Amino acid sequence: MNHFITSLAYLIGSTTFIMGLKMMGNPKSARNGNMVAAVGMVIAIFATIFFHDNTVSPIVYGLIFGAIGLGTVMGWMTAKQVQMTKMPELVSLFNGMGGACAALIGLMEYHHNIGKTGALLPIVAGLIIGSVSFSGSIIAFLKLNGTMNQPVRLPSYNMLNNAVMLGVLAFGAWVIMASPDNSAILFALFASALVYGILFTIPIGGADMPVVISLLNSFTGLAAAFGGFLYDNKIMLTGGILVGSAGTLLTLVMCKAMNRPLSNVIFGAFGGGAVAAGTSSEKGSIKDISVSDLATLMNYSKKVIIVPGYGLAVAQAQHVIHELETILEERGVEVKYAMHPVAGRMPGHMNVLLAESNVSYDKLVEMEDINPEFASTDVVLVVGANDVVNPAAKNDPSSPIYGMPILDVENAKNIVVNKRSMNAGYAGIDNDLFYNPKNSMLFGDAKGVLTKLVAELKTMD
């Protein structure tokens, strides 16, 4: 009877995972999809605890529920308090914890299965992949929060990384075949995998962190899937496969959005402070625009496109920009948002940010759909975005971002870029758009500038 109940719970949980993932593909249903998948996970966890075939002492139950309670409180409080700008770091940290759990399973289960090659294969594979995901995610977290804001360029690091990777794989294969009953050897394998995770992530530049987070997420899913094989646990296997495949697909989509192969992301250290060809004086001069002049320009426009970037998130200006959108629409101005796939610090960062301020989902237009509309746009307002609107990606073969698809904002009749300063963007290169004759710079904190812009437009009633 217990086996039937757990099997039914796992079937329900697996179904909710698939439903939830499907719902997360649409911004309108993403929140509900997350809840559906969470409910399925809760069902699976409690079915496993209460309908396990073996007898469990009350002390073990106390430890289990104590750990669940502690983790729930810590996770809930952290997620509720985190700022939107810190969301990528939180995702990276949580992903690292998933990898650590997979590694711990390997450390705990190894000695119970010595000599069983079929069981040791998923154990060692989960241990290695989970360890790489854990240490790599921690490095990604440190890069995203600015603690490690520059890639570390080790001598011959490609050869070094490959040598360490092959060494770890060979070590793991030997452990499976030889099955040594030695904790020191097992922990040496664990430590070597952690080292490879650090070496794998540490040379990668900051602009590639969204891709790396997605890739590490797929590693965690794969490690969890190996745990499902080990325990013959269908829900663990389903969840791991879904996370692993979704992470892999997202990684490939983001690489395509940047027009770069994954190997170039891993070995190229893009975003490590490269400098674009040419100096500012060679490119031309920039011009400023005042808030009042921009308000007048927008007030008499027919179509306005807003390009959100990480600076919008830093300034927490999403609610003000929605108010700006509302005022313009009340005056008959068509307003849309141009969404680049890798804007912000993680996939969908800007979409989530704007959804938080109740911006209608149908106004968030993806790059391939919005690009043809720029030519018929009166004003493009770029708020805190940089590399995703840099024409060097199309015009300068020497640029590190050359070939990356960008938003064609230079085709608009008027361009206004809001930035705090002329500092380079996340990729560390100058932006040719700033010197375009049609472009004007509006310097200042996004929230402060947009608040003044909204106030100015209200006086034009």
Image (cartoon, rainbow, N blue to C red):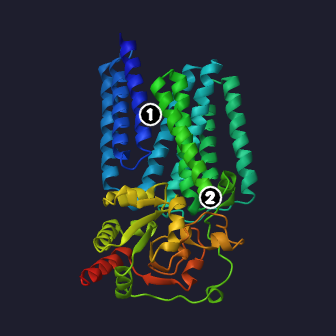
Classify residue 234 as left or right of residue 457: right
Q: Nearer the viewer, residue 296 or 417?
A: 296
What type is the residue that disc 2 sits on?
Answer: Ile
- Res. 390 visible in picture: yes
Task: Find residue 18 and name its label.
Answer: 1
Classify residue 198 as left or right of residue 347: right
Q: Quadrant of the C terminus?
A: bottom left
Q: Is residue 104 above or below residue 353?
A: above
Residue that badge 2 annotates: 204
Q: Position of residue 355 (x, y in %)?
A: 35, 57
**Disc 1 vs disc 2: Cβ atoms closer than 8 Å?**
no
**At x 48% / y 84%, what residue is drawn?**
440
> How many numbered dots are placed on residues in this image?
2
Mark closer to the chain start, 1 or 2: 1
Q: Quadrant of the N terminus?
A: top left
**At x 69% / y 36%, what residue is drawn?**
169
Q: Nearer the viewer, residue 159 or 114?
A: 159
Q: Nearer the viewer, residue 174 or 449?
A: 449
Q: Secondary structure at mark 2?
A: loop
